[in-house]
Image (cartoon, helix red, strand yellow):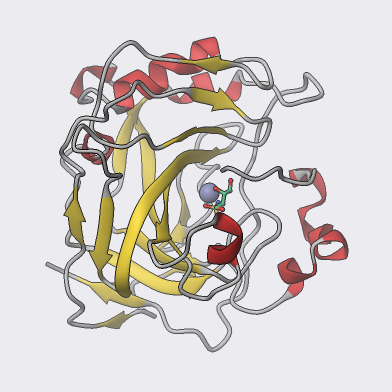
Amino acid sequence: FGTVERKFSYVDSTKWHETFPLCGGAEQSPIAISRHKVIPIGLPPLQFAGYDELFQDLLRIQNSGHTVNFSIPPTVFGERPSVTGGLLQDFYEAREVHFHWGSQQSKGSEHLLNGRRYDLEMHIVHRNTKYSTTEEARNNTDGLAVLAVLFKVVRTGPSFYQPGLTEIFGSLLHLGDFNSTYVPPVLITLGSLLSNLDRGNFYCYKGSLTTPPCSPSVLWHVFAEVLPISHQDLPKFWQLRNRHGRPLLNNFRPLQSQETRQVFHRRP
Ligand code: 1SD
Ligand code: ZN
């Protein structure tokens, strides 16, 4: 994500605060979202720009040792896709996409929805366009917006994917080693990663990065609809390896307490 990250491990995530003090601070993510505890509210819908435009470059997907991710290139019209609406008072430009997963089914998502942990969670990380660096964005409570999509495994072939998710899940077979990269030979749109998801139905709250330095700088928007992932594709995540050549598994942070924070629910 542009900056050099200090090393951390999911094995001792409860000790992150010793090296990264913000991880022990307030307004941390992820949290458990429960439909009985959310506040229904008439928030404006999320408004997407450039999500349906093709990127002008191919994606370079990489195994970072902590996740699989790629930076967002500009679209053919020269700007990155952006989002506003929901809890967002400004425009937020998409910068990076990555995933969190487990080591078996029913494990892997960071957020819980109605008591359930899902198999995979995708984060589309956006930066407020009024900040010019990631560093600056992380130092402000309105710096970042992450759109989160949960996935649940289904026993069918991957034929239901649109280009986008197909390219990413397919590229995992080339990304086994730490630092390896792969460029799928197809131009896609950012919107294709959301498939036919109902973009009008989401939960939102103020939280943090779920990785060190855990800056409380993220306006989280978690879609209520869960997308399918084929039982042939999910295990491809479990074959990846970290910088020590060991399996890259369970890269989800433990639940953090909601405390006095409010979680809102917008329905279409
Ligand atoms: O884990 C990511 C991290 O890689 C980076 O993208 C960061 C944004 O600066 O976001 C976290 S997360 O909170 O989206 N998991
Ligand atoms: Zn993430």
Task: Classify the position of the C terminus by image quarter.
Answer: bottom left
Q: Quadrant of residue 113?
A: bottom left
Q: Position of residue 265 (x, y in %)?
A: 28, 74
The residue at the far left in this view is: 268
Q: Residue at x 61, y 59 (%)?
A: 135
Residue sticking out furthest to the bottom: 260
Can residue 155 be seen here? The reply is: no
Q: Could you say where residue 139 lies in the image, as x and y percent from the top left? A: 60, 70
Q: Residue 155 is drawn in which quadrant? A: top left
> Would you say 94 lies left or right of 9 here?
left
**Residue 55 to residue 125: above or below:** above
Residue 245 visible to the viewer: yes
Residue placed at 78% from the left, 43% from the top?
9
Count of marks, rendered view: 0
Residue 102 lies left or right of residue 123; in this view the side is right
Q: Is residue 172 left or right of residue 221?
A: right
Residue closer to the observer: 121 or 77: 77
**Residue 88 drawn above or below residue 188:** below
Residue 54 vertical placement versus 207 (above, below):
above
Q: Quadrant of the N terminus?
A: top right
110 relative to 53 in the view: left or right: right
At x 32%, y 27%, the residue is 165
